[in-house]
Image (tube, grey):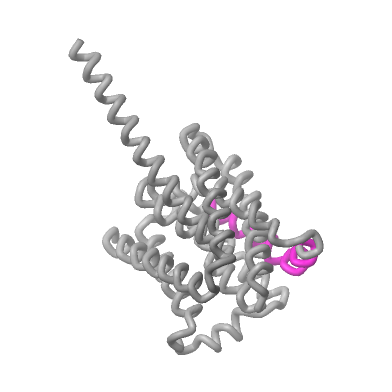
Amino acid sequence: VISNMHLLCQLTTISAEQLIVGGLICIAVSIGGIVAGMNGFGFAVIGTTLIVEVLGPQRAVTLMILPILAANLSLTFELDTAGLRSCGSRFSVFIFTAAIGTLLGMISLQYVPVAPLKLALGIFVIMYVLLEQEQISVPGESWLSDVCLREGTTTMSVIGFVSGFVFGISNVGVQVIAYLRSFELDRSTMVGVLAMIFLGIGLTRVFIAGAIGLYTDIEAITLSVLAVFPGVAGVAVGQRVRKVVSSRTQLVIIFTLLSLIGIRLLQAGVTSI
């Protein structure tokens, strides 16, 4: 009897832990979805960074693959058929090279040490916020824009590959947003183009994840599928909020969240080294 009671308590404890983990994942994905619905980006980096605290880097990146795919699929409807065709042609080189970079990034994921990765990502996110905000002038910003943010095939290929690699290994896609902002697209088109690019990369990631064995764990597949629903719901909420909240307020929200995420990654990276 004592043995059966001990087993029952153990099962209850496990179920409670799973419930807490599931709830935290749901909250993280919902927050990411709301931000993505408002701005067209932020879903992957916010969701992944929050989930990393619960599951660790590799499992967090794997879990977010399907929610990212579903969220960006819903956002592509912001572009009409003509817009999809035009933007698809314009950014085809970027999408292709990003897919290749994503492949290599995902393969490298299991070999990259966690602490240096967190530190590098923290620095990258903070640098993005500093370069994108308009309140403080950052030395070298105009030079960096002139060198990196061009529309030529070579530049687009290099940035696409590097962006894909970083995204494949970390789910961080702010480098894609930084590049696309240089084209001065209107808000709706920007959201649609971002979704189209991440959708193309996301489809590649699903096949790669299956091929290299990231989805051999049934629990990982189940969590990834279930996380789709709060993510898509969050996107829908964010799209509604976007219509009533000014662009400036939206940027303040996303930059604040990214700054907190960047600081958290820096702290975790330094502590772990």
Residue at 68% x, 68% y: name it. Answer: 189
Task: Indicate the quadrant containing the C terminus: top left, top right, bottom left or bottom right.
Answer: bottom left
- Say left or right for 267 vs 143: left
Position of residue 85 measured from the top left corner of the image (x, y, whole percent) = 80, 62
When asked about the image quadrant of residue 209, the answer is top right
Q: Residue furthest front?
A: 244
Q: Nearer the viewer, residue 116 or 130?
A: 130
- The residues colored magenta run 84-106
Q: Nearer the viewer, residue 37 or 221?
A: 37
When asked about the image quadrant of residue 158, the answer is bottom right
Residue at 68% x, 57% y: name it. Answer: 76
Residue at 45% x, 73% y: name it. Answer: 252
Position of residue 133 measured from the top left corner of the image (x, y, whole percent) = 47, 80
Residue 104 in the magenta stretch? The answer is: yes
Q: Is residue 167 visible?
A: yes
Residue 197 in the magenta stretch? The answer is: no
Q: Is residue 169 visible?
A: no
Residue at 45% x, 58% y: name it. Answer: 46
Task: Indicate the quadrant containing the N terminus: top left, top right, bottom left or bottom right.
Answer: top left
Tell me if residue 139 comes above or below residue 84 in the rendering: below
Tell me if residue 117 comes above or below residue 107 in the rendering: below
Q: Nearer the viewer, residue 106 or 133?
A: 133
Position of residue 88 measured from the top left corner of the image (x, y, whole percent) = 75, 63
Position of residue 62 measured from the top left corner of the image (x, y, whole percent) = 50, 46
Q: Residue furthest top?
A: 1
When asked about the image quadrant of residue 142, the answer is bottom right
- Say left or right for 3 vs 11: left
Q: Main secondary structure of the magenta part?
A: helix
